[in-house]
Image (tube, rainbow, N blue to C red):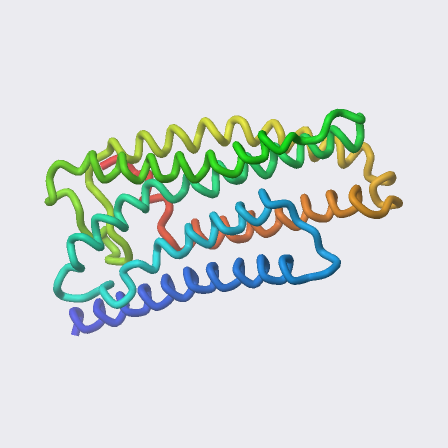
Amino acid sequence: MSNSSSVDHLRVEVTVFNTFSFLGVLSLALVAAAAHFSPTVHRSELWFRHIFSWIVYSTVFLFLLGHQGEPSPPPFGLCLVQAALIYAVPIFPTLSAFGFVADLYIGLSASVYGKRKIRPALTKILITLPQIVFLGVFIEALVLVHDPGVVGLEASHLYCHVTTSEQSLISGGIIVATGLLIVPLEIWIAVVLYRNWSTFRSSSGTDLQFVTMFIHMTELVGFHRMLDDQFSGSKEHWRLQ
C-alpha cells in the first residue's frame, strides 16, 4: 500500500511540475506574440530576447517528458544534456535581464538627463553575450563530467543533475556577479521613476511606454521567478553535493 501511495504521489509531483513548466512556456510565448503582432505595443529587441530566455529556461525542464518516475532510468545522453543545461540555463535569463535593465538605464538617462542613447554596437553585445556565455557554460558542464555515474535523476525524479559541485560553483558565481550589477541599476531606475512619476504620467509616447514596460516586465519576471522557485526545485540546483 505504501509503495502504491508513493508512486501516486510521484505521479502528482510530475504532473504538477510539467504543468507549470508548460504554462511557463505558453504564457511567455503568448506575451511575446501579443507584443510582436500588436500595432500599438512597441518593445525593444532586448525585451524579446529576455522573454525568449525564460521560454528556453522553462523548456529545459520538459526534456524528460515521458521519462520521469519510470522504473528504468532515462536515456543517458538525454539525461546528460539536460543535466548540463540545468546548470547553464539560469545564466541565460540572468544575463539577458542585465542587458534589458542596462538598456532601460541608458534609455532613461537619455530621456531624463539628455544623455546619448544606446549605440547599435552595444545593443548587439547585450544581445549576443548571454547566448555565448550560456553556450560556454553548457559545454563546460558537459566537459566536467568525467564519470557517467555522477549523472542521474535528482531525488524527486523530475529532472537530471550531476552530483559534483564544479558546475554549481561556476554557474552560481556568474549569476551572483551579474545580480550585483543588476540590483544597483534597478534601484537607480526605480528612484528616478519615483522622483519623476508625475512627469511620466502626464507624458505620452516613448516616455510613458518606457515606464509601463519597466513595471510590466518587473511584475512578469517576478511572478515567473516565483513559480520556478516553487515548482522547479531551483534551490536544489545550487546545493553543493
Q: Is residue 22 above or below residue 1?
A: above
Quadrant where the N terminus is found in the figure: bottom left
Count of numbered tags: 0
Residue 109, percent across and down? 74, 28
Which residue is at a point 20% across and 35% down the rendered structure image?
Answer: 143
Which residue is at a point 57% across and 49% down the rendered structure image?
Answer: 48
Quadrant where the C terminus is found in the figure: top left
Q: Nearer the viewer, residue 17 or 39?
A: 39
Residue 214, percent across and down? 67, 44
Residue 182, percent across and down? 56, 31
Which residue is at a point 45% across and 37% down the rendered structure image?
Answer: 130
Q: Nearer the viewer, residue 47 or 184?
A: 47
Q: Is residue 99 above or below residue 65?
A: above
Q: Which of the 4 image quarters holds residue 149?
A: top left
Q: Which residue is the extreme one toward the front?
A: 121
Q: Does residue 212 appear to the left or right of 76 in the view shown? A: right
Q: Does residue 197 appear to the left or right of 39 in the view shown? A: right
Which residue is at a point 41% across and 42% down the rendered structure image?
Answer: 90
Residue 121, percent across and down? 58, 30
Q: Nearer the viewer, residue 111 or 236?
A: 111
